[in-house]
Amino acid sequence: MQGRVAVVTGGGRGIGRAIAVKLAREGAKVAVSYRANDEAAKETAALVRDAGAECEVFRGDVASAGDVAALFEGVEAAFGKPEILVNNAGTTRDNIMLRMKEPEFDEVMETNLKGAYLCTQAVLRSMVRARWGRIINISSVVGILGNAGQANYAASKAGLLGLTRSVAREVAARGITVNAVAPGYVETELTGGLEESVKDQIRGQIPMGRFGEAEEVAEMVAFLAGEGAGYITGQTLAVDGGMAMQ
């Protein structure tokens, strides 16, 4: 991955930060996209640079076509054409279906699914010309299994799986792979705030009996982004401790 240009959306913290740092350690130049948390993005950039890689951060909303255009113009000016795209940006607005408001549904779909569409479309032309590219969409075990109170989130993450397979078929002959990674419950700021009784309940659903680490997801993403995964495309790889065994 030495010298490759990688873009990680939602890279300011959590799984996105772990992915950015891992790609940096593999030799990529890393562009981190984030929506709001300036301090977190700066911390990620410092970690990426400590790993020995060049890094630039770009603030914007992946659900906005204008922001996405500005992001990739900035990336190209800083590093050149993107060769690796990790669609990690995501949000939640949990509610049961009976009470879910239309804006709660729309915001999740626009960030999680439309954002991936906009970013993927932004990089495809240059990847096709180069006849090389790696696109990794971060889905979720919830997109495979569903989850009460998360119909909007599950729909968006399941949509990413269909997007992955369809785009993979379109560009496979051009040397571009498109895959999805579906994390299970991972130790992040979000899960860290759960009560211990809730965590115990969740662990009871995981065959391995523990939460995952963001770095374990990053390992899978780095593999899919590298040369060794050149014959893998259109796949969903679950990093979930066995929750979604098929």
Image: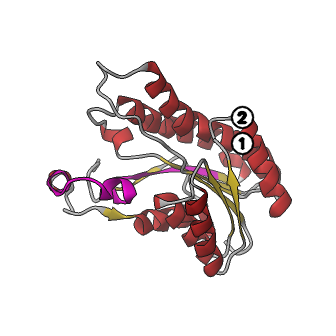
| Residue 65, disc | 2
Q: Residue at x 52, y 39 (%)?
A: 112
- Residue 168: percent from left, percent from top: 60, 43
Q: Is residue 242 above or below residue 110?
A: below
Under mark 2, the amino acid is Ala
* Start-end of magenta stretch: 177-199
Q: Is residue 149 above or below residue 120?
A: above
Query: Regarding mark 1 in the picture, which secondary structure is present there?
Result: helix
* Residue 166 location, quadrant: top right
* Residue 143 location, quadrant: top left
Q: Is residue 202 above or below residue 220?
A: above
The stretch drawn in magenta includes residue 115 = no
- Residue 152: percent from left, percent from top: 41, 30
- In the image, 58 versus 206, the foreground residue is 58
Q: Are marks 2 and 1 in contact (CB under 8 Å)?
A: yes
Instruction: Check disc 1 and report the residue beneath it.
Output: 68
- Residue 212: percent from left, percent from top: 33, 63
Q: In the rendered view, does 98 fall on the left or right side of 167? A: left
Under mark 1, the amino acid is Val
Q: Residue at x 50, y 26 (%)?
A: 106
Residue furthest out toward the right: 77
